[in-house]
Amino acid sequence: MDPIYLMNNVFIIVCFTLVLLMQGGFILLEAGSTRMKNAGHIAGKTIFTVGVASIVFWAVGYGFIYGEGNAFIGLSDFFFGDFTSEVDGLAGSTDFMFQLAFAAIALTIAFGGFAERAKLTAYVVFAIAFSAIVYPVVAHWIWGDGWLADLGKQDFAGSTVVHLTGAMAALAATIILKPRIGKFNKDGSPNDLAGHNQVYTALGVLVLWVGWFGFNAGSTLGVDGAFFGYVALNTQLAAAAGAIAAMFIVWALSGKADIPTTLNGALAGLVAITASCAFVAPWAAVVIGVIGGLIVYASMKFFEKMQIDDPIFALSVHGIAGIWGTISTGFFATPELAAMNGGEAGLFYGGGLTQLGVQTIGVVSSGLFAFVLSFIILKVMVTIMGGIRVSEEEELIGLDMAEHGSYGYPENMPTEENKAPGA
Amino acid sequence: MGLIWQSTEATVTQRICLLRKIKLREHNRYTSINKGVIEDGYSSQGMRYEDIKELRSDRIKVITEDHILLNEIHDELMQSIVEIAVAEVKSELGSPPSRFAFFLMGSAGRFEQSFWSDQDHGIIYEKSNNENANYFIRLGKEISKGLSICDYDLCDGKVMASNPLWCKSIDEWERQVSGWLTEDSWQSLRNISILFDSRVLVGESDFLRVLKDIIFKRLDKEQNIIFRLLDNVGYVKKGIGFFGQLLPETNSKGKGHIHIKEKILFPYVNSVRLLAFKERIYLPSTLSRFNHLTAFYKDMKEYEETFHRILELRLHFQKRLNEDDNVNLISIEALSSNEKKEIKIMMKNGYKLFQKTKGIIQQRG
C-alpha cells in the first residue's frame, strides 16, 4: 500500500488521540473553575457525555455532516462502519474518528453553560439533541457539501463549527438556566464564585494547548507537504500571544495579573487561530492571538454586566474568540494560502471585502442557527421534564451529593445534614 | 387483596374527636404560669426531671399505634418539664420579669412526635431589655436541660429556646421574621418554614399568632414569597427506583435502610405546609391542616388518611427498635412484602401530593 497513504492515516489517528485527550483538558479546566462540591459531577459527566456523543455521532451525526444530501444536510452514511471505505485520502474509519473527536469537543464546550446547576437528565437529553442535529447541521454547511462551503467559507479547524456552535448552545443554556445562586446580588452586582483549584485550570489549559496541535495540525488531514508544521507554528504563536495579551490587559486595568484571565487568553488565542491557522502569515497569527486575548477579557466583563452567568467562560473563550477568529481570515488570509486551502485572500492582501463578507455570513448564520435551535430544544426540555435546573437545596449542597450520591472530595465536605423542618 | 388498611366508622369518629382535641390544644391552650394554675394535666410541684423521665418511660410503653394519644402524653410530660424548669429558674432569678410564650416546633409542634424525637422550641417574651434577655435564655437552657434529661434529644441544628436565635422579645422576633422574609435566602426561608410549624405549649398563644400574621401579611404583599417557599422544599428525595424498587440510603449509616421521615413523611408535611401558607392556616399540625384543606381541595381526604396511616406505621416499626438506633431508619430486610408494597404506595402518593401542590401554587400563586 502507498506509504504516504499509510502515513496520513497514522498522523490522523494520532491527532484524533490528541483531540480526545483534550477532554481531559476540559475536565481539569472545568473542575478547577467550579466549586469542590461539584467537582466529581463535572468530571464524571464529561466522560459520560463523550460516550453519548460518540454513539449518537456514529448513528446519525456523521451521516448528517458528510453524507450525500443537499446544501442543508447530509443524508447517508448513518451507522458508519465499512472498513474498506476511503474518505478524503484517509481510511474511512480514521476520518470518522477524527470527526467524532471534534463533535465531542463541541458538546463539551456547550455544557460549559450548564455548569453547577443543571439536572443530569438535562445533560443526557441535550447531549443527544446537540450531537444529532445542532452540531451536524453547522458542520455540514461548512465542512460537508453545504452552502457555506460553496461560498468559500474559511474555517480550517472549526472556530465556527466547533467553538462558536458550542458557545451558542452554552449561551442558550445559561440564559434559560439563569445564574447560579449567589452569582448576582439583588442589586445586580456580581460576585466572584471562585473555582476551587487554579492548578487544575492551568493544567487543563496546557493539556488543551497540546491537544490543539491534533485539532489544528490534524485538520490538514494528512502529511502532504508537511504543511501541518506550518499550521502548528501559527497555532503556537497565537496561543502565546493570547496568554501574554490577556495577562497584560488584566494587570494593566486591575493592578493584578489574574490567573484565570491569563489562562483564558491562551485559550482565546487558540480558539481564534483555529479558523485561520492555515490561511495567515505568522505575524498575523500573533496579531490574531493578541486581539483574542484582549477581547476575551472585555467579553468576560461584558457578560457579567449583562447579568449572564458564564461559569467556565465558554461564551467569551469559545464564542467571542471564535467569532473573531473566523472573521480574521477575511482580513489576513494570504493569496497563496487561500489558493491552497480554499476561499479568497483577505482584505489586507488586496482581496477586497469578499472573503470578509463570506466569513461574516458564516458566523452570523451558524451562530444564529446554533443559538435558536438550542434555545428551542432547551425550552421543549423544560416543558417536558418539568424544569432542567436542580432544586435550590440540591444546588447548595452540591451536585456531587445530590445527583451522584457521593462527594468528589469526601474529606473536605461537611457531613452534617441540613436542618430540615420538623426534625 | 383489598385495601391494606380499612377506615371503619368507629375509627373515623374517634379521629374526629381526637382532631378536636388537637384543635383545642392549639387554639385555647392558656396556662398562667404566674398564677400557678394548670388547665389540664396534673401539678408538677415537687417533682424532679428524673421523675418525669420515669413517668415518660412508663406511659409510653403502653402505646402501640395510637399516635395521637402518644402526642398527648408527650405534651403533658413536656409541660411538666417546663413547669419544673420555671420553678427552678424562679428560685435562682425570681419570677419571670414579663409575660412569655414557650412554643414547640418540629414534629412536636406538628403534634407528630414518635417515641423518640429531638427538641425544637423557642421563647417569645414581652419586653425587650438585657435583664429579660438573660432571664429567658436561662429559662430556655433550663428547659432544654430538663427535656434532655427526660430523653428528648438536643437539636443538632440548635433550634431551641437556649439559642438566642429562637429566644427573643416580641419586637425582636417581629424584626427577625421580617428580616428572614426580606433576606429571601434558602436558609432564612427554611427558618420561616420551621417557625411556621409551631404552637404555644405554655404561655401567651397570641404572641405566636403575631409572628404568623407577619408572615401572612407579607404573603399578601409579595407574590414571589410563596414561590420561594416552594423552591425551599423542592428537593424531594426519591424513595423508589427506576425498576420500582425501594431505594435505601447510600451513606454508611443508613445502608439497607429507608429514611422514613425524608422519603415518606416529608412530601406530605411539606406539601401541606405550603398549602397552609397559601390558605393562611394558623394550625401547625399536618393533620389539622389536612382537615382544614379538605374544604378547599378535593381528594385531600385520601392523602389525609394515607398520612394518618404513615404515622401509625412509623410507631409500629419503631416499637421494634432500641433507643440507640436512629428512629427514622427502617431496615428494608425487616419489611414484609406487604409492608414494602404499602410503603411504596405511600411514597407514590406523597410525590403525587407534592406535584399537585406545586401545580396549585404555581397556578394561582
Image (cartoon, rainbow, N blue to C red):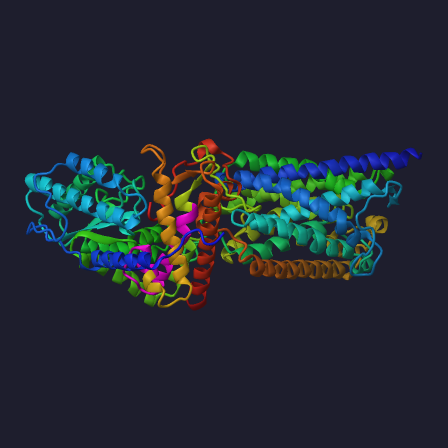
- Secondary structure mostly seen in magenta is helix
In this rendering, does residue B119 appear at all? yes
Where does residue B323 sit, x and y in percent of width and height?
Answer: 31, 34
Q: Residue at x 89, y 35 (%)?
A: A4
Left or right, B165 with respect to A103, comes to left
Q: Quadrant of the N terminus of chain A?
A: top right
Q: Quadrant of the C terminus of chain A?
A: top left
In this rendering, does residue A143 appear at all? no
Q: Would you identify the image quadrant in which residue A226 lies?
A: top right
Between A349 and A70, the one lying in front of the other is A70
> Does the magenta portion include B297?
no
The magenta segment is: B263-290
Between A403 and B22, the one lying in front of the other is B22
* Figure check: B102 above or below A32: below
Q: Residue at x 47, y 54 (%)?
A: B2
Between A243 and B357, the one lying in front of the other is B357
Q: Would you identify the image quadrant in which residue A245 lies?
A: top right
Q: Residue at x 34, y 55 (%)?
A: B183
Where does residue A306 sit, x and y in percent of width and height?
Answer: 51, 58
Q: Would you identify the image quadrant in which residue A17 lies?
A: top right
